[in-house]
Image (spheres, grey):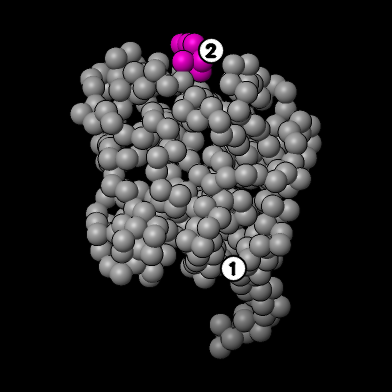
Amino acid sequence: MFLIKVLKKYRKIILIVFLIVFSCIIITLTDFLPDFYFIHWNDLENLSCHHTDAEDVLPSAEDMEFPSTIFFHETSCKGGLDSRQACAVESAARAHPYWDINVLFTAPATEKSLKKSTYLLKELNNIRFYRINVIQYSKGTPLEAFVARGALNRTKWRISHASDVLRYLTLFKWGGVYLDLDVVVARPLYSLSRNWAARENEYSVAAGAMAFSKDNVGRYIAEAAIRDIKRNYRGDVWGHNGPGVITRVLKKICSSGDVSKMSAVTCKGFEVYGPEYFYPVEWQRALVYFEPGELSNTGSYGYHVWNHFTQHFRVVNGSPFDSLARKYCPIVYKVYSKDFV
């Protein structure tokens, strides 16, 4: 009886608390309302900067027409490149002097934040920096409503999942080559197929280096990837929206669902290269890049150094990453000197 009396007395308060809790769950776990910046997991993952233009000095990518070329995405709020990212960009530019290398920032960039990054432009005139507003960038695409409803905010890994979605959106819009900002390019990609990705291992196709051309094969894969993101996006699984997308798409279109058997022959013209092309060191052994020694595989097209797992390791003299940087991004290596991390 006592409990019933208490419930009756405070039923309005209980109802209000219930509605608040229920609303928070709906907002956090669904696309019910857009862009709740105040709901974030930590300050590093707060990407409200994606929706401001304060002090931005970069031209807008929405106003451009890109030929098939190389794209990088920087999706944090720092508005510039750190030493490893700048190394990746320089290495791509040196290997492809006749291709434009486009770095797309989702945050405003200032003269100060770009200061060291712009050293790249002094000797390498094929590097371009652009700003994209994620909502504007997705307009007119199948992901317009998905992005506008704030889906990219409802994830534990906002920076990484924004990059995951935007790489597929960029390849859908323009075609070309996408590279992660932790890939040191060692060989020109001209000789590779028009449409390709590479296996990370025998179970998964990776998304750190991909090419979708504007031909029928490339358009088919790009559209399938966008549809997969709309249907299967998850903010609670690390690799679900990056390598998960291309792996799921290829398992559906290839004649064999066995990742190790995927190739242009089995995947309707879409080539799937082996790990040795871009991932000669698996992520579980990524520390190898930062310890003194040499790599056993020296013929890769690029070296993905797994920055998510290695970002806190310093680059020491005589390590494989130190050797790669000296050879493939000498400007950055010189500019950053002892600050090269």
Q: Nearer the viewer, mark 1 or mark 2?
A: 2
Q: Residue at x 73, y 53 (%)?
A: 136
Q: Quadrant of the N terminus?
A: bottom right
Element on which disc 2 rests: helix
Tell me if label 1 and label 2 are in contact, CB under 8 Å: no
Instruction: Write down the quadrant of residue 53 in the picture.
Output: top right
Vertical comparison of 2 with 314: above or below: below
Identify which residue, 187 or 276, lies in the foreground: 187
Mark 1 secondary-structure assignment: loop
Relative to the observer, which residue lies in front, 211 or 12? 211
Residue at the image point whose x is 30% and y is 23% from the top: 320
Q: Quadrant of the C terminus?
A: top left
| Residue beneath disc 1 | 30
**Crowdedness near tag 2: few (<14), some (14–19) or many (≥20) residues, C-alpha within 10 Å:** some
> Which label was assigned to residue 335?
2
Q: Residue 160 has which mark?
A: none
Q: Which residues are magenta?
A: 330-338
Residue 215 image point, x, y percent? 53, 58
